[in-house]
Image: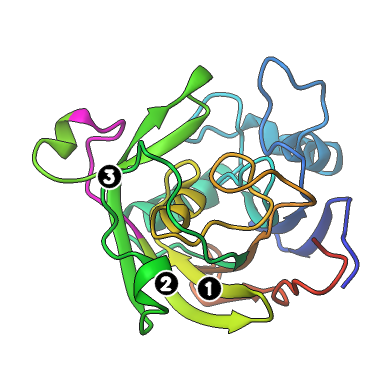
Amino acid sequence: MVMVMEPYILEETGDFAVVFKPPKMHCAPSRADKGDTLLDWYAAIFPPVRKFTGRKEGEGGLVHRLDFETRGLVLFAKNQQSLNNVMRQQNEGGFIKEYGAICQKSPLVHQSFPPPPFDLAGNGIPHTPFVIESFFRPYGPGRKQVRPVVGAGSKETAADKGGFYRTEVTGFSAEDNGLAVTVRLRRGFRHQIRCHLAWIGCPVINDPLYGQAAQGFLGLLASGLVFVDPGSNRVREYHMAPLEKSSNSL
């Protein structure tokens, strides 16, 4: 599998566009970006995407974000009605994001984590499916990382006062010297998958924040999207092939 380093459109309709984001690219502009984000790229193809009003100012029709290091599928709405429709699906848990990760089995090394729900390094591979859940709080210099928050008073100390963030682990298997993990999210927080997997002793490979020093691209792919088409009211599913640890895709 050859690493794709440029964005491309997987599918486009009159109401939405499914776009591949390569690694090392931001989804939406910040003060440091110079017109090289995924939103900038798609706006050069479809300029009206900047005009729509979503959850955050300046994100236009961008429905959701991926981390800078994470590659995979991102959804853009192409009109305000479609954006409102999909955001409602998100609020109701009907917008599903699927991910594939290549991880390493590793003892928990971050002392700032609370006790994990189970310890992968000590207890072996659990039966799937299973769920990892917590609130989150910013952590570290520049608040660049997050940490799980659980137990008494967790809601009061969390960055988000809503319910627990749930990482649904749907597949978990040994692969060469690593672990192939598939997960599903219905509601997401920044770095949720990376943090949750590291919490149970299973950091994503090449993760400089939650694992060991990076020697390549982050082993995390946003591999699938499931949502209801705002125009036809039909369920749409989009999927990408999983990552292979042995390939040059990492």
Q: Which of marks 2 and 1 is nearer the N terminus?
A: 2
Q: 198 or 25, which lies in front?
A: 198
Instruction: Describe residue 237's horizontal placement relative to residue 148 as left or right.
Output: right
Q: Mark 3 points at which residue?
A: 114
Location of residue 173 with respect to 77 vertically, above or below: below
Measured Cα–Cα span from mark 2 to mark 3: 20 Å
Q: Give the range drawn in magenta.
A: 157-166
Task: Name which residue type carries label 2.
Answer: Val
> Is most of the magenta stretch helix, strand or loop?
loop
Task: Name which residue type carries label 3.
Answer: Pro
Q: Where is residue 153 in the image (x, y as percent from the top left)?
A: 10, 35
Residue 121 among those drawn in magenta = no
Which quadrant of the view contains residue 127? bottom left
Please state which of the two labelled residues, at mark 2 or mark 3, is closer to the viewer: 3
Measured Cα–Cα span from mark 2 to mark 1: 6 Å
Tell me if mark 1 has few (under 14), some (14-19) or many (20+) residues whose alpha carbon lies within 10 angstroms of its own.
many
Q: Mark 1 points at which residue?
A: 182
Q: 201 or 145, which lies in front?
A: 201
Q: Which of marks 2 and 3 is nearer the N terminus?
A: 3
Which quadrant of the view contains residue 208? top right
Q: Earlier in the sequence, mark 3 or mark 1?
A: 3
Q: Assess whether mark 1 and mark 2 are in contact (beta carbons under 8 angstroms).
A: yes
Q: Name the residue under label 2.
A: 169
Q: Assess whether mark 1 and mark 3 are in contact (beta carbons under 8 angstroms).
A: no
Task: Name which residue type carries label 1.
Answer: Thr
- Label 3 sits on a secondary structure element that is loop
